[in-house]
Amino acid sequence: MAETEKKTPVYVEDSFSETCSAISSGVITFFLMLITTVFPLIYHNSYIDILETKYKAYYIPMLAMLGILLVLGLVMMLIDFKEWGGEHTKELFSSLKPQNWKETFCIADVAVFLFWVIALISTLQSDYLYESFWGNEGRYSGLFLLTIYVVVYFVVSRFWKVQGWILQLFLISGMIMCVIGITDYFQLDLLDFRGKIKPEQSTIFTSTVGNINTYTAYVAIIMGFAGARFTQEENRFKMIWYYICMTVSFFAIIMGCSENAYLAIGSMFAFLPFVVLKSRRGILRYFVMISTFVTVIQCIDWINQVFADIVIGLDSLFGIISNFNGLFPAMILLWVLTALWYWFMVKGVQDSDVFAPGKLLRRIWGGLLIAGAVALIFMIYDANVGGNGARYGSLAEYLVFSDSWGTNRGYIWKASFRMYQKLKPIHKLFGFGPDTFGIMTTDKIMAEMIDATGQIFDNAHNAYIQYFVTIGPIGAFAYVVFLISGIGRITKKRARSPYALACAVAVLCYVCQAMVNLDLPIATPMMWLLMSAGMGIAGKRREN
């Protein structure tokens, strides 16, 4: 009888912890459901107020979620102190003691917290305090939104039990968004959006997202997630679903006609072999992926020929590739290699050491990437320093850097560092203030900017340069460490969940395309969500 009485409190305490955990996770799940379904598809007045609409559709649910969790947390603490003397609360807060930091926080956690602290200091020392806080003179990415990103990151990564169906909703809404974008390539304008904007700007806005750069950034996240899941999925029907999502995202990201797509696609195909080369099935799936991608480019080329008077068309690197005479033979060759590998798997000698997956293949792949990087660096050096850009033909516009490079990105990148050099010492350390880049350009280089490009830049078209100038080198460095460390940690712990690798690759695709793009409260919230989910999987989630 005495033993029973001693065990009962333990059972009750465990039950209380589990109940609190389940309630918190349930609240988070509900609001993440809104973010993965309503947020990507919501709009109000065509593209005219799409940024403001998405901004509100993100921060309002997130503030509501945080507010509800705060109230629930206080209620749970009161119950804990009343029934168990605050044992659960004390255990929870004990993780915040310095001696427990190593177990509680990883490098990514420390980096993102430092990023927020620097953003706070940057805001307080900015000459434009109000604008730095709200980001109202930029793209609403001031301290207010950055704070929500960081707080939600810690809440989701600590207290959300990852639900696969939420991530499936992310894919479903993503497919709807992609299909609308594909129809816009055919200029069908199903949502009747383009009649409300200037005719000359009609082709740079698409789907329910807005600018094509932001659209392809969002599609890159979908592509990375679906592609990674396709390479890992064991269930046949789910594998087919992921293949469909991946293929649709290939069509969508190419038809998005934005330059940032190259970096996202390249990063995915460069990164995945380090994971898939560990198994014969993984190698087969990778062959299927790359064969499908080339097939999609060929199909788009055929579409452009048949519907030349209807479609927008490709005028970028994808246009060069689609016009390549060897594209069709390359497509056939890839599918033949895929079939041969499948035969090797099914009909060949199962225990053969020939092409056996393992470290050797991954090292060979790493060597090829290094060789490719060296070749690219040489080509850039030769085209710019050597003055031999003409020898590279149509690729010269990508290899030769000038003010007009990347739709005048070359100019604004150079101008960004020139403006930075003229900042006050404290601004050189902590930046001009979050999302105040447009204020800087207007105040400092307005006339020069218009004379040189005919444009007004309110952002650097490079997320990392923008953070460097507006938050400072320490903040920018902390942000990069957060991204790299987070992706690495999630990948390392991918065996814990089938969704871990998908989150890592999705974030990687976004991170790479951001080198020629900017962070907006349209695609960026989804990157933070998947990073949070992935870190929740990778971390040692405390059940209390």
Image (cartoon, rainbow, N blue to C red):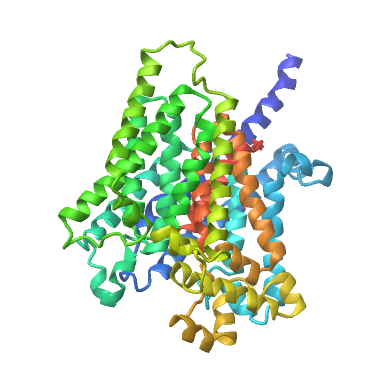
- Relative horizontal placement of residue 520, taking residue 69 as reference (left or right): left
Residue 511 in view here: no
Residue sitting nearer the eye, 213 or 395: 395
Instruction: Name the residue located 42 percent from the left edge and 29 percent from the top edge.
Output: 233
Residue 467 in the image: x percent, y percent? Answer: 62, 66
Res. 335 image quadrant: top left
Within the image, what quadrant is residue 415 found in? bottom right
Residue 185 image point, x, y percent: 26, 59
The residue positioned 30% from the left and 59% from the top of the image is 314
* The C terminus: image quadrant: top right
Instruction: Name the quadrant of the N terminus.
Output: top right
- Total marks placed: 0
Say which residue appears at 38% left-offset and 51% top-offset. 37
Residue sitting at x 36%, y 49% = 174
Position of residue 503 measured from the top left corner of the image (x, y, whole percent):
51, 42
Of the pair 182 and 335, the residue shown nearer to us: 335
Give the image location of residue 34, x and y in percent. 42, 52
Q: Nearer the viewer, residue 209 or 130?
A: 209
Q: Is residue 464 left or right of residue 350?
A: right
Identify the residue at the far right of this view: 99
Instruction: Name the residue nearer the viewer: 330 or 458.
Output: 330
- The reply to whether residue 48 is in sight is yes
